[in-house]
Image (cartoon, rainbow, N blue to C red):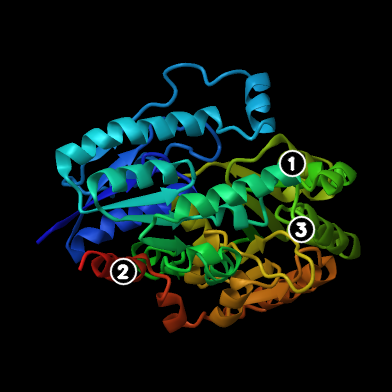
Amino acid sequence: MEKKILFLAYYFPPLGGAGSQRSLKFVKYLPAHGFRPLVFSGAKGGNDRWAPLDEELAREIGAATPVRRVNLYERPLGGRLLRATRELLGLRGQFGARWLAQVRGAGRKWCREHRPDLIFATMSPFDTAPGAAELAAEFGIPWVADLRDPWALDEWQIYPTRWHRMRVRREMERSLRSAALIIMNTPEAAARCRKEFPSLAGVPIIDLTNGYDAEDFAPEIRPSEHDEFTIVHAGAMHTAAGLRQRRESGRYRVLGRATEGVRLLPRSHFYLLQAVERWLAEDPSIAKKIRLEFVGVPTAEDRALVDTSPVAAFTTFTGYLKHSESVRRVRNADLLFFPMHALPPGRRATIVPGKAYEYIASGRPVLAAVPEGDARDYLRQAGNATLCGPEDVDGMLAGLKARFAAWSAGEKPVPPDTEFCRRFERATLTARLAGHLNDLLK
């Protein structure tokens, strides 16, 4: 018999970006396993760089899948001073409060109408958790917490003070206690959750990664013949956050705003540009032989780094592209650049940016400037990446030169480990999810 899932996902097509991909693919493939998702989502409008419009993704939603959308922007969300005051006091933000109110109100009506067998809450926004827990208790059904990012365990996050970080940590632990299943999206995050929150020992905690859709990478194609050696970075860069942390390092340290030893600036093109500038100084002829392409929505700070660099003459920013076009650019690259933040020795990253899986699936060579963690492990095992540290300009330069030399000689890239890559196909991941959901409903 078909099982109904109330699928709470604020980020859902036609909103694009990384936040929508995971939810869309689960909803797309779950019906094949006997589940009927009932999607409860935010409004259709893309109002910021993290939720751009991508109407093409919406066409993947099955006609039989009901989608209930709520609008959080009927009234202004308050000025900058109000938002800053709420943040300083550790209060729930206006956006999160409105979303939670909709989950409690309209979500309750949907539960009464459809009588779901289970609630699946994918986060962020993390304000979804208390609403899911209340609905589950009221209707006597289990709820699943799907953390696309590891919430308080995410070493990438910046807080106003150390106190705010601890407050969010307590909220995470409290909110997840009633979940029937907790899903973290990396093995490291799952292990960290088990270790850091012993009070959750009675709740199963598993990892279910992000991935790629096999349809996006079929049929197999040969990359276009470029006149220039094309280096592509797809997705958001975090130049502004990194420069701010470096500029205000003393304040960050005193207030405990960032996790100790974590440096944000490497998760941008800051060090890549240094490597290319050094290469250009050594061999000016490469200016006519290489091209840098940044696919995604750039900030003013992202552009400023390039505008003040000699690489500006052979660098382009595409702006936001629909997902299929972004994938095409990835598949046609001669080298893919994959940066992450820097961590202190002995610490592993809890996150794997979503583009890692599509980079692996593309079969294209990858220059990965990453810390220890699952992302580094996956890229090493896939076999199509050159690895270096997040701030290792020498390593980046060596990787660039080696791949350029191979391209110039007409050498074919080393293909990735196909069997390893298949473990990250969205259909395979959804089959695993379905198995866990069936176990909850036995």
As displayed, is residue 237 above or below residue 414? above
Q: Residue 312's spot in the image, x, y percent? A: 77, 45
What's the residue at 75%, 42% (across, down)? 161
What residue sits right under mark 2 in the picture?
436
Q: What amino acid is labelled 1 in the image?
A: Ala
Q: What amino acid is labelled 2 in the image?
A: His
As displayed, is residue 171 above or below residue 327? above
Q: Left or right: 232 with respect to 344? A: left
Quarter residue 413 falls in: bottom right
Mark nearer the N terminus (2 vs 1): 1
Q: What amino acid is labelled 3 in the image?
A: Val
Specify the quadrant that holds the N terminus.
bottom left
What residue sits right under mark 1 in the picture?
240
Q: Residue 261's spot in the image, x, y percent? A: 80, 60
Q: Nearer the viewer, mark 1 or mark 3?
A: 3
Q: Is residue 107 visible?
A: yes
Q: Is residue 207 visible?
A: no
What's the residue at 78%, 39% (across, down)? 304
How many neighbours does mark 2 have within 10 angstroms: few (below 14), some (14-19), or many (20 or more)? Answer: few
Q: Secondary structure at mark 1?
A: helix
What residue sits right under mark 3 in the picture?
262
Which label belongs to residue 412? Answer: none
As displayed, is residue 420 above or below residue 303? below
Q: Residue 176's spot in the image, x, y percent? A: 46, 54
Q: Left or right: 329 with respect to 202? A: right
Q: Nearer the viewer, mark 3 or mark 2?
A: 2
Quarter residue 439 falls in: bottom left
